[in-house]
Amino acid sequence: MKKVILSLVVLISTSVIFHSKAQTQKIDSCDFFDTVVNNHDQIFQLSCIPSAVEMILKYYKAVDFDFYDLQNAWKNKSDGSFRDFDNKELYGFTFSQKFVLPRDETFPIDSLFQTIENELKSARKVIISLPGEAGWHMFIICKQTPDGEFVSYSKLGNHTLILRNTKEIVKKSNGTEIMTYSIPNRLL
């Protein structure tokens, strides 16, 4: 009986150590779609901003996959924007709104694209606001293709949205805002 109890204690201790170690590591970027996006929902029609932030937090395992606190607090807030998360720290991540500029012919699109490329090269995703049929929707840019285009993912309810022409959409819109984030030191 003592051997069985000792074995259980060792097994549980090993599981706890492994689990806590896994909690401080991000998911491999090639699994972002399968692991994060496919296991996440946008639970309110207008909660795409907090939904995107939740996906980032889930990517780094800062929160569990059943975490929807940001969307539940936001609900269908109709006057929300990236400003609501600008310089806000959540679970050690600080989010920053960027390119809050008029969307016109003077918008610095090349600078926007370079900023996104730099974030991706630093192994960080970028939250981006893109126009859609019913207004603006938030996506997460996860990678750049060999031809230079950005691939973006989002959720609308439990439906997964994938864009492979993000740059083209931004150019047609004369620019857009993005949100970046800093990674807590414990994850670096």
Image: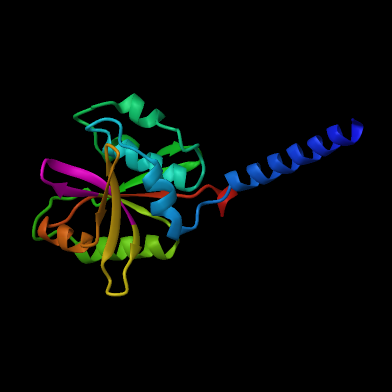
| Residue with the most extreme bottom position | 147
Is 130 magenta? The answer is yes
Q: How many marks?
A: 0
x, y (%) of residue 12? Answer: 74, 37
Instruction: Name the residue located 39 percent from the left edge and 39 percent from the top edge.
Output: 54
The region drawn magenta spans 129-141
Left or right position of 139 against 93 = left
Question: Which image quarter is the C terminus in?
Answer: bottom right
Q: In the rendered image, which quarter is residue 136 located in?
A: top left
Relative to 116, is 87 above or below? Answer: above
Is 131 magenta? The answer is yes
Q: How is the image coloured?
A: rainbow
x, y (%) of residue 35? Answer: 44, 49
x, y (%) of residue 182? Answer: 45, 50
Question: Which image quarter is the N terminus in?
Answer: top right
Relative to 67, is 138 above or below? Answer: below
x, y (%) of residue 69? Answer: 40, 28
| Residue with the most extreme right position | 2
Instruction: Name the residue located 34 percent from the left edge and 30 percent from the top edge.
Output: 71
Q: In the rendered image, which quarter is residue 77 located in?
A: top left
Instruction: Name the residue located 79 percent from the left edge and 36 percent from the top edge.
Output: 8
Relative to 110, is 176 above or below? Answer: above
Instruction: Name the residue located 13 percent from the left edge and 41 percent from the top edge.
Output: 135
Q: Main secondary structure of the magenta part?
A: strand
Left or right position of 20 against 59 = right
Q: In the rendered image, which quarter is residue 115 located in?
A: bottom left
Relative to 102, is 3 above or below? Answer: above
